[in-house]
Amino acid sequence: MTAESLIIWLLVGAIAGWLAGLVVRGYGLGIVGNIIVGIVGAFIGGWLIGSAGWLPGGLFGSIISATIGAVILLLLLRFVRRAAT
């Protein structure tokens, strides 16, 4: 992995995590939390959207699919937290 691709991963993760935090209100995770949620969301979104046979290309498509995955991740975290209490 080159330094350029690592920077792109981090930027996509940060943007996707930030957007997911806006969609799922109540999740202000900070920059590191947004990056982690965005990167995990990229795996989830890539797997779900890739399984459906529709995966947009390019940087914009990567951000969209990572955001969808991050929203799903945050909703699952919210569900688990509510079930635990």
Image: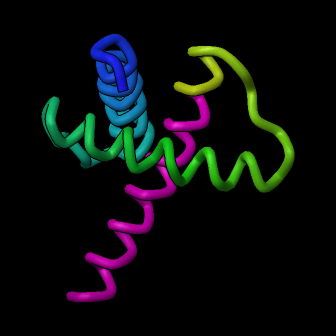
**How many numbered tags mark residues here?**
0
Report if residue 15 lies within the magenta region.
Answer: no
Per the picture, the main secondary structure of the magenta-coloured stretch is helix
Give residue 36's position: percent from left, percent from top.
26, 44
Give residue 18's position: percent from left, percent from top.
32, 30
Q: Farthest residue to the top: give it.
A: 4
46 vs 32, left or right, is right
| 68 and 43: which is toward the camera | 43
| 35 and 6: which is toward the camera | 6
Res 54 → quadrant: top right
Give residue 6's position: percent from left, percent from top.
32, 23
* Residue drawn at x 25%, y 47% as measured from the top left: 27
Pick the quarter of the image with the C terminus.
Answer: bottom left
Report if residue 68 lies within the magenta region.
Answer: yes
* Residue drawn at x 34%, y 11% as measured from the top left: 4
Res 75 → quadrant: bottom left
* Residue drawn at x 19%, y 40% as measured from the top left: 28
Start-end of magenta stretch = 64-85
